[in-house]
Image (cartoon, rainbow, N blue to C red):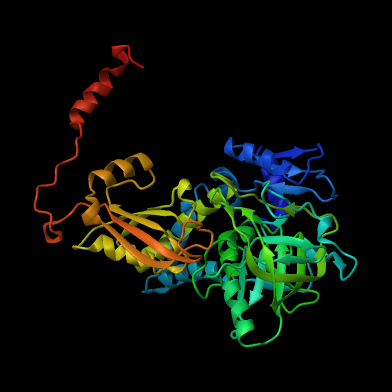
Amino acid sequence: MAYRNLREFVDRLEREGELRRISAEVDPELEITEITDRVTKAGGPALLFEHPKGSSIPALINLLGSRRRLELALEVGHVDEVATRIRSLMDLPRPEGMLDKLKLLGRLGELDAAFPKTVKSGPCQEVVQRDNFSLREFPILKCWPGDSGRFITWPLVVTRDPATGRRNVGVYRMQVLDDSTTAMHWQTQKHGAGHFRQTRDTKSGRLEVAVAIGADPATALAGILPAPSGIDEMMLAGFLRRSPVEMVRCATVDLEVPAESEIVLEGYVDPADLRTEGPFGDHTGFYSLEGQYPAFHVTCITRRREPLYLTTIVGRPPQEDYFMGYAVERIFLPFMQMAHPEIVDVSMPVEGIFTNLMIVSIRKSYPGHARKIMHAIWSMGQAMLTKVVVVVDQDVNVQDPSEVVWKALCALDPQRDVEFVLGPLDTLDHAARMQDYGSKMGIDATRKWPEEGFTRPWPGEIKMDPAVKARVDAMWDKLGLK
């Protein structure tokens, strides 16, 4: 049974020993970050700060900061189970008889349950504040000493495509500028930024925006996942939680938000109103620099009577966002494999901070196959921002960094096997020659074929005879060795 809201998940974490309540007063300015950073890096629990300084609203952080909590959030034994469900829907056979048709209806029913459901009211509107409100009522964090202010770090930002009316839900940091205004950090390649540009270019006035904070864990995660084009993030959330997300119409804007949210900010973005945003201590482990971004004007706040404020921090990895990135890697592997069946597995190591490094293993079938995959990665949604792609053979375990480094470097002739291209890069890449654009590198670390100009024999890998291994296993306890 899906978690109806964030509170049900908090209760589950507490029962599982995965949540620690902090009763001491702790300052949202820097102190919560320092505590959370230490706890996350030590593999510790989610934290509920019950008395953040300057606010009566508890702050919840490190919610998904371990694989165990990620699995609890998705209600699976391993995140790969979600990928298995996706593959089963992608591989729907043509039914031959009545039994096959009944089985097919069952699987299609799973998809039908994913569609969001509109309801008349929800807990997120127990309190409606159309005036006399302030964003400073919430325990919004200043995370790092060099940050330019306090930032909302886990908002589900809802907009509609001005042309099609199609909804987008994304997570974009929001710097608090005053009691009712934030900056909206819409990076160039994000869908929210596309809606903003369309509104600006067509001179169609203001762009309505709603921001939900603190939904059930699958819905909160869905805002981060790079949903394939045309797929509603709330439908993806429904698929993940195996139950429709209940949506309620906002009080003052023509948008819908998850009805069980803790807090909702309603308002608009004026294309003519840009503000200076940043610096911000980012997931790269460095500060992203200041820039000009749209101002979000809050015109109404709705919330539960006693809300929780869900937040997260980013910084030098590993942080909580590493585990979210791991979910992205596993959940979207089937989509990559559907487009390119030769892909065996993918890994985005924590040190690669999502966009700097992707390691891909393939079933190599023809000369130049690895280079084809490099360019395929650079053409797939947000994967286009990947700065370095390393392609290895199918027998390399891409989840084992030690094996990857060993086998990739032993297969590599740098001049022959390294390729450079120019293209779009992550806005947060401070090493790029200019914002959003620079060079990328592909490394073909597969075994080379004669057709690729390699005429020497390729050596075999050293492995012990299985029979010898079995004999040694049998005598091991008698050898006095540990």
Res. 123 image quadrant: bottom right
Residue 226 left/right relative to 56? left
Q: Position of residue 279 (x, y in %)?
A: 64, 56
Q: Work out which residue is located at the far right of the displayed protein and give it.
A: 132
Give residue 457's position: percent from left, percent from top.
9, 47
Q: Residue at the location (46% across, 60% down)?
A: 432
Residue 397 in picture, x, y percent from top left:
33, 46
Q: Which image quarter: residue 171?
A: bottom right
Q: Residue at x 28, y 47 (%)?
A: 408
- For the N terminus, the quadrant is bottom right
In the picture as drawn, the residue positioned furthest to the front comes out as 433
Q: Where does the C terminus fall, quadrant-wise?
A: top left
Seen at 67% across and 47% down, the residue is 144
Position of 465 with respect to 425 (left or right) is: left
Asked if residue 25 shows in the view, the reply is: yes
What is the tally of numbered marks visible in this picture? Answer: 0
